[in-house]
């Protein structure tokens, strides 16, 4: 079983609490104050395409469901200004990503929540794996501080920090330091074996 397959859960998964995502803006303030880390404005939602559908059919269904398309598409009934900036991408492991951008962390979280909720209500809940938010060193960060990702486990309702170093290496010391900084601001995953590495992560 692959590391992202494990995120899907095989027995009695905890019911997802999407509202836990709204704790992230407050945690972002803590990260900036204590570690000099700020949101890059980028996030991603990872999901596993159903085996019974072709990649083209799945992409078309998701595109229609979420209203992804050109802002000037006359067939869209949703005002372009209300649509998230969102693209689709497939990683080298065959997992699909919906990539979102918004410079304001509050709005970014709201849009990630909206997409997760829309997919869940459309019956895609079993396919959702995780949501990922990128944080980078800001002006107040020390020279030793590196970028970090906060990963929300859809099936667990918890977060964990992930700090890739390049290749298939990770900075576990940085991850544990960020966990300590976050304290009780976020529901951090207590089981370290579930801090899955997300190699080939397309979120900037």
Image (spheres, grey):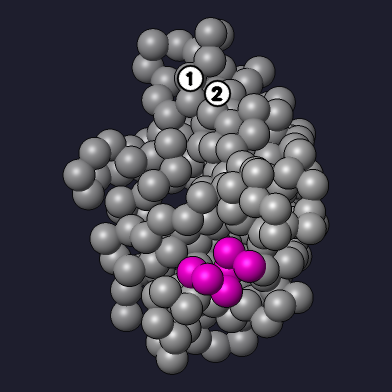
- Which residue appears at 31% of the width and 53% of the height? 199
Q: Residue 180: horizontal and vertical position, in percent?
A: 57, 36
**What main secondary structure does the magenta stretch of the protein show?**
helix
Q: In this picture, which residue range is highlighted in magenta?
A: 59-64
Q: Residue 110: horizontal and vertical position, in percent?
A: 76, 46
Check residue 61 for magenta coloring. yes
Q: Is residue 150 above or below residue 51?
A: above
Q: Nearer the viewer, residue 5 or 81?
A: 81
Numbered circles on residues, count: 2
Q: Residue 130: horizontal and vertical position, in percent?
A: 54, 61
Q: Nearer the viewer, residue 66 or 125?
A: 66
Q: Nearer the viewer, residue 201 or 2?
A: 201
Can you identify the residue that label 1 sits on?
Answer: 137
Q: Is residue 143 left or right of residue 154?
A: left
Q: Nearer the viewer, residue 119 or 73?
A: 73
Q: Secondary structure at mark 1?
A: strand
Q: Quadrant of residue 89?
A: bottom left
């Amino acid at each position: 079983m692959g590391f992202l397959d494990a995120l899907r859960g095989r027995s009695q998964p905890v019911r997802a609490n999407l509202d836990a995502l709204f704790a992230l803006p407050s945690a972002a303030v803590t990260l900036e104050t204590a570690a000099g880390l700020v949101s890059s404005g980028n996030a991603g939602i990872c999901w596993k395409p159903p085996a019974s559908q072709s990649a083209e059919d799945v992409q078309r269904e998701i595109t229609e469901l979420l209203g992804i398309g050109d802002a000037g598409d006359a067939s869209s009934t949703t005002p372009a200004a209300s649509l998230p900036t969102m693209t689709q991408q497939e990683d080298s492991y065959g997992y699909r990503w919906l990539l979102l951008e918004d410079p304001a962390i509050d709005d970014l979280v709201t849009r990630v929540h909206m997409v997760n909720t829309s997919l869940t209500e459309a019956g895609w809940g079993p396919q959702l794996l995780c949501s990922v938010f990128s944080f980078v060193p800001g002006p107040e960060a020390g020279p030793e501080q590196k970028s970090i990702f906060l990963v929300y486990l859809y099936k667990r309702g918890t977060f964990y920090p992930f700090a890739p170093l390049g290749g298939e290496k990770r900075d576990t010391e940085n991850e544990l330091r960020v966990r300590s900084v976050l304290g009780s601001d976020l529901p951090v995953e207590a089981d370290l074996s579930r801090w899955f590495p997300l190699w080939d992560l397309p979120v900037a």
